Image (tube, rainbow, N blue to C red):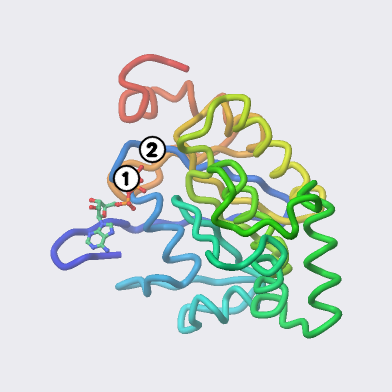
Amino acid sequence: MRFGALKVLDQLDFSVGSDEAVGIVGPNGAGKTTLLNVLAGAFAPSQGAVWFQGVDVSARSAADRCRAGIARTHQVPRPFLGMTVFENVLTGATHGAGLHARDAGDRAMECLRLCGMEALANRRAETLGLLGRKRLELVRALATGPEVLLLDEIGGGLTDAEASELVDLVRTLRSQRIAIVWIEHMVHVLLQVATRLVCMDGGRIIASGDPQAVLNDATVVEAYLGGVAA
Ligand SMILES: Nc1ncnc2c1ncn2[C@@H]1O[C@H](COP(=O)(O)OP(=O)(O)OP(=O)(O)O)[C@@H](O)[C@H]1O
């Protein structure tokens, strides 16, 4: 992936299996969010391809990929303001999962219940705090019926206690057999869920594998952890 003369992803080869929760770490500007954007279809890569379940989806829009089962959340939550929590989740069920009328409503309520947000269903989205907005973003993504969920720094701005709530929520999503790709700077949070850790630097993957082994990898320690092993 290039932006003009700037090469942001360089010969990158990344895959996620259906039973995996892959954590992605790396210094600022490593290309992590760009990778998520390329996978989700927000950016078309300058070269190369994105495959999903054996199909080349490179030419498909983000909305099409969402309907196919690739959902994402954003670094800054983007709830639809002026709508209730339920209505927000309903948009996921309608536009992402392609459900209509009662089926969409049932799906939205089921997702809210599963994620412990049922009591907030009638709250307007703008009245939620940061954690509430982040949880809503996850539930709305869940309502689209994803096979894989791409999470971009959902822990940012949260206290450790709040981040633990998100970890519980991501575990709930895992229990629904959803594969996870999670970019996060709060590594101790990521380690509670990740089955594999990937470290990026300069648009490349510099290490991938068992989370603790990756954190102890000399290249990762040098590039990401400032020379201090985690
Ligand atoms: N739309 C864009 N146009 C031009 N350059 C961009 C664009 N998006 C990202 N970049 C550049 O690409 C590089 C990688 O950015 P990216 O946001 O993917 O990094 P990151 O690893 O997610 O960083 P962070 O941890 O700070 O979020 C940066 O140098 C950034 O300035």
Give the class, few, some or many, for how many residues have Cα within 10 Å of label 2's Cα (few <14, many ≥20).
many
Q: Where 189 falls versus 132 (above or below)?
A: above
Residue occupying image coordinates x 68% and y 35%: 165
Q: Nearer the viewer, residue 119 or 167?
A: 119
Q: Which residue is mark 2?
A: 26
Q: Where 198 falls versus 97 (above or below)?
A: above
Residue occupying image coordinates x 39% and y 40%: 206
- Badge 2 amino acid: Gly
Q: Where 22 falls versus 158 (above or below)?
A: below
- Residue 43's label in the rendered image is none
Going by the image, does 3 lie left or right of 197? left
Going by the image, does 146 lie left or right of 150? right
Q: Is mark 1 within 8 Å of ligand 1?
A: yes
Going by the image, does 196 lie left or right of 105? left
SS assignment at label 2: loop
Q: Nearer the viewer, residue 122 or 217?
A: 122
- Badge 1 amino acid: Ala
Q: Quadrant of residue 106?
A: bottom right
Q: Quadrant of residue 103?
A: bottom right
Residue 19 position in % (x across, y down): 73, 51
Q: Which residue is mark 1?
A: 30
Q: Where 187 falls versus 101 (above or below)?
A: above
Residue occupying image coordinates x 45% and y 50%: 75
In the orientation shown, which residue stands out farthest toward the top? 228
SS assignment at label 1: loop
Residue 170 position in % (x across, y down): 69, 44
Q: Are marks 1 and 2 in contact (CB under 8 Å)?
A: yes
Residue occupying image coordinates x 61% and y 31%: 162
